[in-house]
């Protein structure tokens, strides 16, 4: 029994592995650290495997479970549908949830194609529900400080962004061919999976993309067929081999509508880089650098610092004055990966209370998808491609 007088919002989540765990944890911790206007309640999770979903419900604190996700749409005590399933399921689930009048949070990338993303935007618009997409890295306090510095003009005109998302979890040729490596379930490989995150960071910090030119490569073309285990591990189901039909690595150049230039790289073949989500931005009055693996730190350089003392310095973004940081611990007491989700969900809950869709929402998902589509087109055509606006 809860004595909390704030309005409760019933959550129904579809999928329960890697992101299922991150989202479940965020809902549970959110009212502990924040004072959202509405409070999430973990009503029901859906998964296809009866025993698996039951065990997940018990472990992660959900009140009930279903093996058919459509049952969640019928429940009156469910206000929000949270989609943490593979990319090929997002459109069908989100459009059905919108039709049922449920608010939606969907994992990235929004869809399998720009056409699908457009239909999803149309569905949430018509239904008038609140929607967000889970680009959680925007919500690291250091990234939010970077945004404040750029918006306040502290860096002046922005010239460059160079962003990389480097991982190495599929370098072993025996790593199984799971949904994340199959075009029919994932859309694109490194590009849509991790490239989508640095595209979102660039849109958040710099502005809209206008044109891109890219390249993609698949280094290991045959792998044993298998399943993801949750997280970034997988198990093969036997000796049967299958063909990898998505990119292991992608890189592209970009132009932005404000004249800035961008260099982007997303790969799962950068040995030693476990989760190297990094960017550097250079402006006329300074530069900033961020690295997820040291996510509380923002490195800054300002050209108006005293001559002789100029150079990059490091801000530990744990002060009460830094965005979101004050909700947690005293200065210097660092936060981590899971807190980016808690911060995002605090915005989502307030959006629901106020009937608005905070950024990043399905429109951001659509714009992101437009960049992904343009990179794919530029690779096919071996040329520059305009990004649809
Ligand atoms: N925001 C992030 O940083 C981040 C990180 C990882 C993954 N993701 C995204 O989250 C989504 C899920 O990825 P994950 O890593 O959690 O995958 P996962 O393989 O760990 O989990 C997928 C879940 O979906 C379930 N599922 C699959 N097909 C289903 C169906 N048809 N109906 C019902 N349930 C189904 C699986 O049983 C499993 O519980 C993807 O869109 C992925 O791109 C985002």
Image: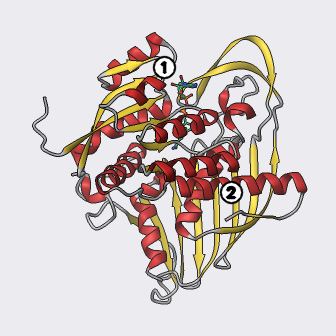
Asked whether the residues under the numbered discs 1 and 2 touch, taking CB atoms below 8 Å apart as contact, a structural biologist would say no
Q: What residue is pinned by disc 1?
A: 68
Closer to the chain start, of discs 1 and 2, is 1
**Nearer to me, 101 or 17:** 101
The C terminus - image quarter: bottom right
Q: Position of residue 337 (x, y in %)?
A: 43, 45
6 or 193: nearer the eye? 6
- Side of 238 where 81 appears, left or right: left
Q: Residue placed at 33% from the left, 18% from the top? A: 58
- Which residue appears at 68% of the width and 19% of the height? 226
> Left of 249 or right of it: where is 77?
left
362, 195: nearer the viewer: 362
The secondary structure type at the circle numbered 1 is: loop
Q: Quadrant of the N terminus?
A: top left
Dot 2, how many residues are within 10 Å of its Cα: few (below 14), some (14-19), or many (20+)?
Answer: many
Say left or right for 378 vs 80: right
User: Do we see residue 267 in this rendering?
Assistant: no
Colour theme: secondary structure
Secondary structure category for the residue under label 2 = helix
From mark 1 to mark 2, how far is it between C-alphas? 32 Å
Residue for badge 2:
370
Please, which residue is most extreme toward the left here?
Answer: 3
Mark sitting on residue 200:
none
Q: Position of residue 338 (x, y in %)?
A: 40, 43
Residue depicted at 49% across the width and 27% down the height: 15
């Amino acid at each position: 029994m809860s004595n909390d007088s704030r309005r409760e919002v019933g959550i129904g989540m579809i999928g329960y592995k890697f992101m299922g765990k991150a989202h479940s944890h965020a809902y549970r911790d959110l009212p502990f650290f924040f004072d959202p206007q509405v409070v999430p309640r973990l009503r029901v999770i859906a998964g296809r495997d009866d025993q698996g979903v039951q065990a997940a419900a018990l472990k992660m604190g959900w009140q009930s479970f279903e093996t058919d996700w459509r049952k969640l749409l019928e429940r009156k005590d469910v206000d929000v549908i949270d989609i943490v399933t593979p990319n090929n399921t997002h459109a069908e689930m989100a459009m059905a949830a919108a039709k049922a009048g449920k608010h939606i949070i969907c994992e990235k990338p929004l869809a399998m194609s720009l056409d699908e993303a457009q239909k999803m935007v149309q569905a949430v618009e018509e239904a008038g529900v609140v929607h967000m997409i889970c680009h959680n890295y925007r919500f690291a306090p250091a990234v939010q400080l970077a945004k404040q510095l750029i918006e306040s003009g502290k860096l002046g005109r922005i010239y460059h962004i160079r962003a990389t998302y480097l991982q190495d979890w599929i370098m072993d040729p025996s790593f199984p061919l799971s949904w994340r490596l199959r075009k029919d379930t994932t859309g694109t490989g490194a590009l849509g999976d991790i490239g989508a995150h640095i595209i979102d960071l660039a849109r958040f910090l710099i502005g809209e993309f206008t044109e891109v030119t890219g390249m993609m490569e698949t280094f290991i073309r045959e792998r044993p067929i298998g399943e993801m285990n949750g997280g970034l591990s997988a198990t093969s189901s036997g000796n049967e081999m299958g063909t990898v039909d998505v990119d292991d690595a992608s890189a592209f150049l970009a132009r932005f509508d404000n004249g800035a230039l961008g260099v982007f790289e997303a790969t799962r073949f950068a040995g030693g880089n476990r989760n190297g989500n990094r960017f550097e931005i250079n402006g006329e009055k300074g530069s900033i650098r961020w690295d997820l693996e040291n996510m509380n730190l923002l490195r800054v350089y300002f050209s108006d610092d005293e001559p002789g003392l100029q150079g990059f310095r490091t801000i530990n973004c744990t002060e009460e004055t830094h965005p979101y940081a004050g909700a947690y611990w005293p200065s210097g007491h660092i936060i981590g990966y899971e807190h980016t989700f808690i911060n995002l969900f605090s915005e989502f809950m307030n959006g629901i209370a106020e009937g608005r869709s905070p950024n990043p929402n399905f429109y951001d998902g659509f714009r992101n998808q437009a960049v992904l589509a343009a990179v794919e087109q530029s690779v096919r055509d071996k040329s520059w491609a305009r990004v649809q606006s």
